[in-house]
Amino acid sequence: QVRLEEFGGGSVQAGGSLRLSCGASGHTFSSAVMGWFRQALGKEREFVVAINWEGTRTYYADSVKGRFTITRASNTNTMWLQMNSLNTADAAVYFCAAGGSTLFSDSPSNYKYWGQGTQVTVSS
């Protein structure tokens, strides 16, 4: 059974930082892109960032460029998301996603496996 699990969510004041991690078990996403999405209450799921299998190429949403950094242990199912300069617009449930393609995509439909999500709360 394939399982993705996120860790590291929590509450932080605006301007603060959090680090999320994602691990997978039950499957090796060989060559597949992994990514992070987020969903705020009452809003659609939104792409945040993706990274390739080797951990050498990334694709960021404009809203997080320069503030968030994704890394991946090369050729593994483990990745991290360092989030700096958080603001209230970043508050959401963050989901780890994987599988489906070797191509970068900002569409949730192109990711086959999902974690349960971890809450990020940012207070002003």
Image (tube, rainbow, N blue to C red):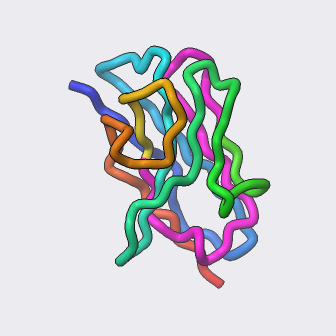
Instruction: Check the picture and name the quadrant holding the N terminus.
Output: top left
Residue at 32% across, 36% down: 113
Residue 61 on image: x %, y %: 62, 54
Q: Is residue 74 left or right of residue 91?
A: right
* Left or right of 72 in this view: 115: left
Image location (x, y in percent) of residue 72: 61, 29
In depth, the one of 80 and 53 nearer the eye is: 53
Say left or right for 95 vs 18.
Answer: left
**Residue 45 vs residue 28, the one in the foreground:** 45
The number of callouts visible is 0
Closer to us: 99 or 86: 99
Residue 117 percent across, percent down from the top left: 38, 53
The x and y percentages for residue 96 are 44, 43
Name the residue: 60% across, 80% down: 123
82 relative to 62, above or below: above
Extreme residue toward the left, this view = 1
Residue, far bottom: 124
View extreme (right): residue: 66
Q: Is 6 drawn above or below residue 28 in the view shown?
A: below
In magenta stretch: residue 43: no
Left or right: residue 123 versus residue 119 is right
Question: Looking at the image, which residue is at 47% across and 52% down?
Answer: 37
* The stretch drawn in magenta includes residue 76: yes
Query: Which portion, as a residue range, is magenta?
Result: 71-95
**Quarter of the rendering occupied by the C terminus:** bottom right
At a point 37% along the width and 39% down the height, the residue shown is 110
